[in-house]
Image: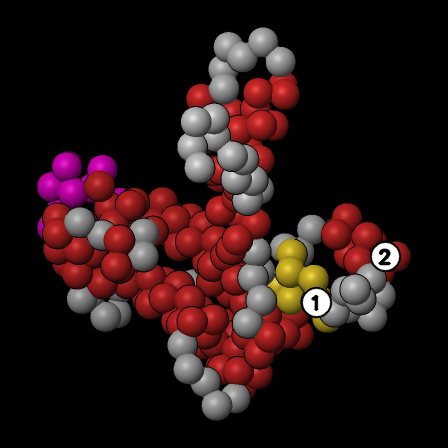
Amino acid sequence: AQLTHVSADAAKYIAVVVAERAPDAIWCMDPFHVVQWATKALDRTRQRVMHRITGLSKVERRNLRWAMLKNPENLTDTQLHLQHKVVSRANDELARAYQLKEQLRYVFHGKHNDPWRAIGRWIICARESGIIEMRGLATSVEAQKTRIYNSIVSDVSNARVEATNTHLRAITKRAYGFHTPEALIAMSTLTRGGACPTLPQRN
């Protein structure tokens, strides 16, 4: 079958392979990697402005990183309270960086009549934020704007591949001590490859 779409990150070596092996395929920028750029930019912002944040206990300061980086739906009640405590400060640099991170996530997962325009609006907001980390992120997003747009309109991502990769790493840990790699391969085939052999003494 003809390869029509490629979902990948922005690594340069991938561009070389795609150009050589699938020059006519539509290249889609994987949403997970773009949002990961945003979380890293947010974390750098947190590290830079941490000394300016007031009203937090030592424990809250230690827990602030995960309260800001995790998706809202994955936060514990304690983390959610801490996140609200920081994000409610509308003019605070870290609060605005967090909002930009969430807005970029919404670009991928929200409903848009014009995804191209939604990406462009986000780039403008990030550039005008005055936050150096987010301005750098805006440059990266603009460089991948076409591929991000392709990902949104084609609804293509690396999600299944990344989930399989994570699962195989877990199996590798469980396989520690196996005499041969064949045991790991067999376990991978059973759990992720769809193999369903007939078991003895079962109809």
Residue that carries the numbered disc 2 in the rendered image: 21
Where in the figure is residue 190, as x and y percent of width and height?
A: 52, 35
Where in the figure is residue 108, as x and y percent of width and height?
A: 47, 71
| 81 in relation to 61, above or below | below
State how the image is colored: secondary structure
Residue type highlighted by circle 1: His
Residue 125: numbered disc = none
The answer to which quarter of the image holds residue 143 is bottom right
| 176 in relation to 100, above or below | above
| Residues under numbered marks 2 and 1 in contact, where contact means CB atoms less than 8 Å apart | no
Outermost residue, right side? 20
Magenta segment boundaries in residue numbering: 51-62
Q: Nearer the viewer, residue 1 or 154?
A: 1
Residue that carries the numbered disc 1 in the rendered image: 5
| 140 in relation to 17, above or below | below
Q: Residue at x 42, y 67 (%)?
A: 105
